[in-house]
Image: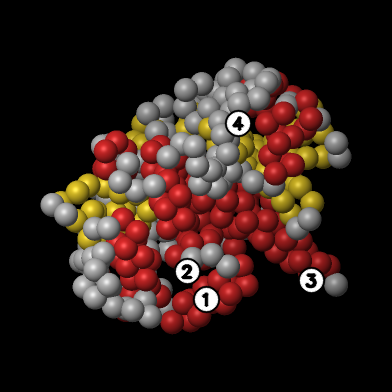
Amino acid sequence: MRLGDVLVAVGAISTEQLQSALAHQRLHGGRLGTNLVELGLVTEDDLAAYLSSQLNLPSATLATLERVPSEIIARVPAEVADRHRICPVRMDGQRLWIAMSDPTDPKALQELAEILGCEVRPMVAPESLIRHALSTHYPRQTHEVSLVATSPYDLEIETHSWEVSTTYSSSPISRSGAQEPTNSEEGPVAARMSLREFSARLAESQGEADLFDSVLTFLAQDFARVAMVTLRGNYLTGWRAQGSGVNQQALAAFSCPPEAIPVFAKAFADGKPLIGRGSPATLGELTAAIGPPGERALLVLPVRCGVDYFGCVVGNGGRPGVEMLLDEFSVVGKKVDWALQSLGLRRKILSV
């Protein structure tokens, strides 16, 4: 059964939503699962849980993928792991268990069995976990990730129709326990707002202030302090913030050109969210408002409205493992862009 059929069968998405995702895939390319996540129809974790349950396959957790022995990693060449987006997990006799985000692709599994010369059994893992595992165990490969350490900041930037058989052989004939996220600086997080709930809040926004309050609330689930700085002319200025220890007076006083803080200049140049660890100099004068970056992750999310930049959202003091949500933060950026354009169109309609 194909991935889309599985999700429709369990009620995760409707037939109409599947057709929308397929149309999005034809237009933008990529895997169906990635397109479903980008459209906010499912989360990566939900996608992995549905596949694990319906296909009766085990799932691979972050802890599992981080503890894979080096001799198991060595069984799969880096190029093969990167091309097929897989991570070897363990040997079971002559069978190799591998983690992958889409185990409904028997052609890929059969090819892997032939390349590796052993039986292959799939485990399910979200795409973000696969990417994290590849970066951990095959650090010389790019995996669509670029790690940069450049003065005057040292932010590590991540750039972000078949039946499934559970055994694949090299023979040509035969063939999460994830923990609820918490932010130790803020205490346990209450019921988490999903990407779908966040999208609904954006759609209901009555203005920019309402919209960015929703954005900051969503990101505050993963960062101790979050702030929005807007681009006015050639200057970034502080606007709104949430979190313990935010200095609202310093935020209101913040004003500087983007090029004065290289991490902002790079975010605008790349047009992608940056996530990693910074130094006390990374945020420049904004440090007075939301504190200096340290050992915990820092997020810089550039915000567009159509072809123009609106500003940047900054998250400081990320919870452990938040780097794996890079794809989700990219989706957040797209949705905020659409929401801002929607507000502009609404004003035009009402002004006529």
Q: Tell me the number on the disc at residue 148.
A: 4
Give the CA separation, mark 3 to mark 1: 31 Å
The answer to whether the residue labelled 4 contacts the one labelled 2, judged by CB atoms less than 8 Å apart, is no
Judge the density around disc 3: few (<14), some (14-19), many (≥20) Cα neighbours within 10 Å.
Answer: few
> Which image quarter holds the C terminus?
bottom right
> Which image quarter holds the N terminus?
bottom left
Give the CA separation, mark 2 to mark 1: 7 Å
The tag earlier along the polypeptide, 4 or 3, is: 4
Q: Tell me the number on the disc at residue 349.
A: 3
Give the CA separation, mark 1 to mark 4: 35 Å
Q: Tell me the number on the disc at residue 190.
A: none
| Element class at badge 4 | loop
Tell me the quarter of the picture where residue 340 sits: bottom right
Q: Amino acid at mark 3?
A: Ile
User: Up-down: is 106 above or below 293?
Assistant: below
The tag earlier along the polypeptide, 4 or 2, is: 2
Residue on which the image places disc 2? 32
The tag earlier along the polypeptide, 3 or 1, is: 1
Residue 229 horizontal/vertical position (percent): 70, 36
The answer to whether the residue labelled 2 contacts the one labelled 1, judged by CB atoms less than 8 Å apart, is yes
Q: Is residue 333 left or right of residue 218?
A: right
Q: Amino acid at mark 4?
A: Val
| Element class at badge 1 | helix
Residue 338 horizontal/vertical position (percent): 67, 61
